[in-house]
Image: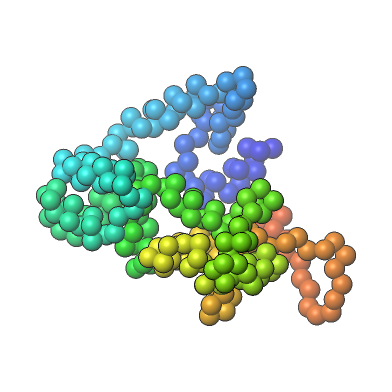
Amino acid sequence: VANETLEGFITDQYPQICRNEADNLVFYPIDNREQIGVVRLKNSIEKLIRDENTQREIPLRWIVLLDEIIKRKSSSSYLNLSEVRELAFEAGLTSSGELEDALTLFHERGSLVHLKSTAVLNEFVIIKPQWLITNISKLIRDKSLHPFNPKEIEAAGLGDDLQLLLDKSLVTRDFLSFVWNSSELPFMLDFMQHGLLLSRWTSDKYLVPSLLHPAPENIQGSGLKCVFDFSKTFLPTGVFERLIC
């Protein structure tokens, strides 16, 4: 059943998926407890990596650049694009186009994170992905396990802002400036919005969909109502999140 369900939309939407030819499936069933299927998956990954279509010769100067970028991990979580340009010049890269190609490759291989959806995102080269997760968790958290520090927030004059977040899942720009470094705020705002983790509500407020409270079971009220039924069709990633926002 799982295979038939996946087959329905994977064939056309994701032709690049490596199928499980041995079992004639589009996925690799694995039992972590008994280690069943793990070796087969490992062998398939290694075979794919060795495939000539995934091999690519790159200039030595790109490796030099990557080494220099990685060295900065000990002192920084990210680099500004201007800093990377200086490293690229020292490594021997000859143009902005070559640097863009190198960063795209490093991003695709998971060596760093470089997003280009907006001008602000493009200016940051993340060399410690954990930094992103840490910043996200400063806002999106389970309040029962990782509560905010009300005394610290009250001292900053943001008590009402915290209550607004807890009650209505709306966060003010002032509160975001408090939890994130001011120099990182523009990047995090763009990142969170493009990742559907935030949605602009007003000029100075944002909705945090993942913090919305469940609706009461017997909700009463007047006005228009609707039902979204996605059971018989494929829903592109992000559409439902946008509807919620």
Q: In this view, does 128 lie to the left or right of 80?
A: right
> The N terminus is located in which quarter?
top right
Q: Position of residue 205 (x, y in %)?
A: 57, 74
Asked if residue 107 shows in the view, the reply is no
Q: Nearer the viewer, residue 39 or 21?
A: 39
Q: Is residue 8 left or right of residue 144?
A: left
Q: Position of residue 118 (x, y in %)?
A: 38, 67
Residue 60, placed above or below residue 231: above
Q: Which residue is at a point 76% across and 71% down the rendered structure image? A: 226
Residue 77, placed above or below residue 95: above
Q: Is residue 200 left or right of residue 56?
A: right
Q: Which of 104 and 45 is in front in this view?
A: 104
Residue 155, placed above or below residue 66: below
Q: Position of residue 93 (x, y in %)?
A: 14, 52
Q: Where is residue 23 in the image (x, y as percent from the top left)?
A: 57, 26
Q: Which residue is at a point 27% across and 59% down the rendered structure image? A: 81
